[in-house]
Amino acid sequence: MIGRKVAARRAATAICIAILVGAAAACQPTGPGAVPPGPPGFRTGYTEGCTSGYAEAGRRGMEDVFVQNEGRFASDTDYKEGWLQGYAACYREERDHPMMGIR
């Protein structure tokens, strides 16, 4: 009898954890501007690349914005990969779906 109680408690705990993980994942922002998980250098690069991609694609109010740490881009592969991915995702998003249709 004790074995069944322990098994039931473990099953209930596992279900609760799965629900919490699912709920936390649902709260994460999505879309090209949402920074994907990765090392800190990748995340910084993604954010800066995304800003630059929006600007290059013509997002209103960002026309003169370009953010890139040239030293890190040349020496930090995580930063460079993040920057390139962020730039491509946000450039494509702005070109395909302009912010509020304004150019």
Image: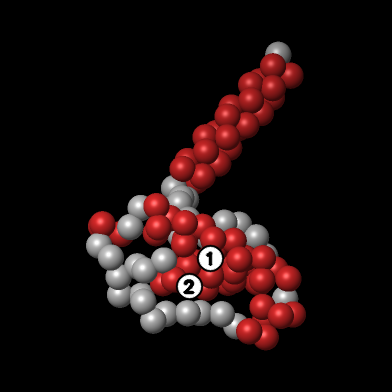
Label 2 SS: helix
Q: Position of residue 80 (x, y in %)?
A: 66, 71
Residue 44: x percent and y percent? 58, 72
Q: Is residue 98 left or right of residue 39?
A: left
Which residue is at the front of the view, 20 or 8? 20
- Tell me which corner region of the image, top left, top right, bottom left or bottom right, holds residue 40: bottom right
**Quadrant containing the C terminus in the rendered view:** bottom left
Indicate which disc residue 52 carries. Answer: 2
Q: Is residue 75 above or below residue 53?
A: below
Q: Amino acid at mark 2?
A: Ser
Relative to the observer, which residue lies in front, 56 or 44? 56
The residue that appears at 66% across and 28% down in the rendered structure is 10
Tell which residue pokes out farthest to the bottom in this image. Answer: 71
**Residue appearing at x 47%, y 61% in the figure:** 90
- Residue for badge 1: 87
Q: Quick one: label 2 or label 1, which is nearer the N terminus? A: 2
Q: Are marks 2 and 1 in contact (CB under 8 Å)?
A: yes
**Neighbour tally class for label 2: few under 14, some 14-19, many 20 plus, Cα within 10 Å:** many
Residue located 46% across and 43% down the image: 26
What colour scheme governs how the chains and residues are painted in the rendered image of this protein? secondary structure
76, above or below 23, in the image: below
Whether residue 43 is visible? no
Q: Quadrant of the N terminus?
A: top right
In which image quadrant can residue 33 be found? bottom left
Whether residue 74 can be seen here: yes
Percent x, y of residue 62: 36, 75
At label 1, the amino acid type is Tyr
Residue 35 pos. (x, y %)? 53, 60
Q: Is residue 61 left or right of residue 24?
A: left
